[in-house]
Amino acid sequence: QRIQAKLASMYFDVKDYTSALELVGELLKEVKKLDDKLLLVEIHLVESRTHHQLRNMPKSKAALTSARTAANSIYCPPLLQAQIDTQAGTLHAEEKDYKTSFSYFYEAFEAFQTSDDPRAIYSLKHMLLCKIMTNAAEEVPGLIDGKHSLKYAGRELEAMREIAEAYKTRSLDKLISTQEKYQTELAEDPVTKFHLKNLYDTLLEQNLSRLIEPFSQVQIDHIAKLIKLPVSTVETTLSQMILDKKFNGILDQGSGALIAYEELPDNTTLNAGLDTIEEMGKVVDSLYTRAARLS
């Protein structure tokens, strides 16, 4: 079974997720009969990672819970516990709970560092990512230059330093150029890649909001020139902002313009009137029901 568990892990590494899940399913039935808790932890971890890559978050979390339950009933080796913490940090980050995620990545980093495991740098990188996503980008240089991080100095950490700088200055150009400059370090790490996409969307919305603020009506292609992005990208983002109620206005497809509406103050009298009408409607319905019973 250990050889098969290793094979399932290799299937995951080469992104053959279907084969990995099929093998995991067979292994779980056999290993549960043997009551090999340590092997069970490893298999559930592979299962959790695979479901995560397939974006099936409920099953990924369920598999991680199973891995933790099995690990709690035995002595769990530090490196295996670090892998559990890494997966927990990854899933919490998916739910935008970056503070809890940072704690898990920190635990994993300490365990990997103590064992001189090369995976320590990835835990450190994800810690820095969590700091950026919690609006604490100014703390990133201090963490990178700290005594525990010096041995990991290199392109991986420099990439995160520049991402933090881009976020701190709200510079979309800087973020794009950093991603192009450190494509291997950022795009090939699935955790970093996923959250940098969210960071890009956030910065794009913030930059667009700042640019369109002075206008009551403006051509979309003019905004696209100002922000140096394709018109289609700007149009799609503005549409989403309007749907999400982050911007009060409409897109006029005929003239290719964005029209902003004035923010109207809350009309308390109107709201109170609507509430009264709604309550009166309930009273009338109640009286109608009682009258029907009497007749």
Image (cartoon, grey):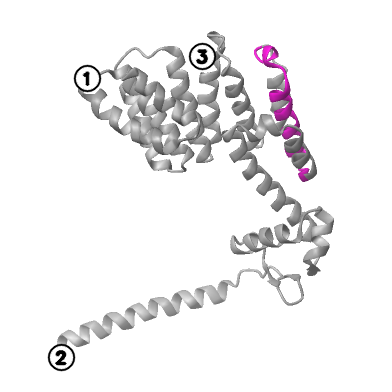
Q: In front: 161, or 293? A: 161
Labels 3 and 1 touching (C-beta < 8 A): no
- Name the amino acid type tagged 3: Ala
Labels 3 and 2 touching (C-beta < 8 A): no
- Name the amino acid type tagged 2: Ser
What residue does disc 1 label? 34
- Disc number lying in front (3 or 2): 3
What residue does disc 3 label? 111
Residue 68 lies in the magenta-colored region: no
Crowding near the residue tagged with mark 3, few <14, some 14–19, many ≥20 C-alpha atoms within 10 Å: many
Kindly identify the residue that appears in the image at 80 percent across and 68 percent down.
219
Alpha carbon of mark 2 to alpha carbon of mark 1: how far? 72 Å
Alpha carbon of mark 3 to alpha carbon of mark 2: how far? 78 Å
Residue 295 is tagged as 2
Alpha carbon of mark 3 to alpha carbon of mark 1: how far? 29 Å
Tag 2's secondary structure? loop
Looking at the image, residue 265 sits to the left or right of residue 258; the answer is: left
Kindly identify the residue that appears in the image at 46 percent across and 42 percent down.
54
Report the number of discs.
3
| Residue 71 position within the rendered picture, expressed as x and y whole percent measured from the top left | 34, 20
Which image quarter is the C terminus in?
bottom left
Instruction: Give whichever of discs 2 and 1 has the lower sequence position.
Output: 1
Crowding near the residue tagged with mark 1, few <14, some 14–19, many ≥20 C-alpha atoms within 10 Å: few
Instruction: Tell me which segment is drawn in magenta.
Output: 148-172
